[in-house]
Amino acid sequence: MSFEERNTFIAILTDLLVIGLFVWQISTRAATGAFDGPDGFAAWGRLVLVMTGVGILASIALTILINIALRLITGQKMPAHLVDERDQLIRLRGAQVTLLLASGIFLGGVALLALGFSLFTALNVMLAAFAVGTISGSLTIVVGSPTPLA
C-alpha cells in the first residue's frame, strides 16, 4: 500500500470518527435544548468551531500514530512518496467530487431555508454537505488509485 493510499484510508477513518462525534454532540445538545433561545446559534457555532479544531488535531495525530504503528508492526521502511501525473489527476478528481457534492448539498440547505425549514435544520444540512463531500472525495481517490490495494 502506498503512502498516499495509507493516508487516504486514515483520513477516511478520522473523518468518520469526527463526523460521528459531531452527530453525537449536536443531537445530544439539541435534545437538551442547548441550541434553543437567543444564544442557540452562537452555541452551535462555537461547537462547530471546536469540533473543526478537534477534527484537524485528530487527523494529524492519527496519521502520525498509525503510520508509526504500521512501521513498527510490519518493519517496513516508509514507502516511496512518488507522485506522478496519474496520481495528481486522481487527487484532482477527488477534489472535484468533494466540491461538487458539498456545493450541491449546501444549496439544498439553502433551498430548505427557502421552503420554510428552520435555520437549525438548514445549518446542519450545510454542515453535513461538507462531511459527505469530504468522505466522497477520499473514496474517489481510493477507488481511482492506480496501484493495487494490499
Image (cartoon, grey):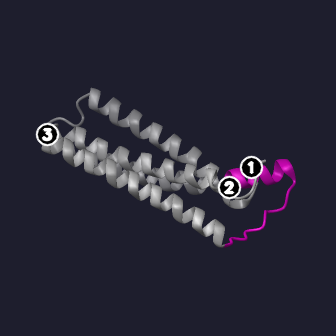
Magenta stretch in the rendered image: 65-84
Crowd around label 3: few <14 · some 14–19 · many ≥20 (10 Å): few
Which badge, 2 or 1, comes first in the chain's sequence?
Answer: 2
Q: Residue furthest top?
A: 31
Which badge, 3 or 2, comes first in the chain's sequence?
Answer: 2
Residue wearing tag 3: 115
Mark nearest the camera among 3 and 2 is 3
Q: Quadrant of residue 77?
A: bottom right
Position of residue 107 measured from the top left corner of the image (x, y, whole percent): 26, 51
Q: Residue at point 57% right, 63% down?
A: 91
Residue wearing tag 1: 149
Q: Residue at point 69% right, 53% down?
A: 6
Mark 2–mark 1 contact, CB under 8 Å?
yes
Q: Is residue 86 visible?
A: yes
Crowd around label 2: few <14 · some 14–19 · many ≥20 (10 Å): some
Q: Is residue 72 magenta?
A: yes
Residue wearing tag 2: 5
Question: SS of the residue at dot 1?
Answer: loop
Q: Is residue 41 magenta?
A: no
Which badge, 3 or 1, comes first in the chain's sequence?
Answer: 3
Q: Amino acid at mark 2?
A: Glu
Q: Amino acid at mark 1?
A: Leu
Residue 63 appears left or right of 113? right
Q: Amino acid at mark 3?
A: Leu
Reply above or below: 7 against 22: below
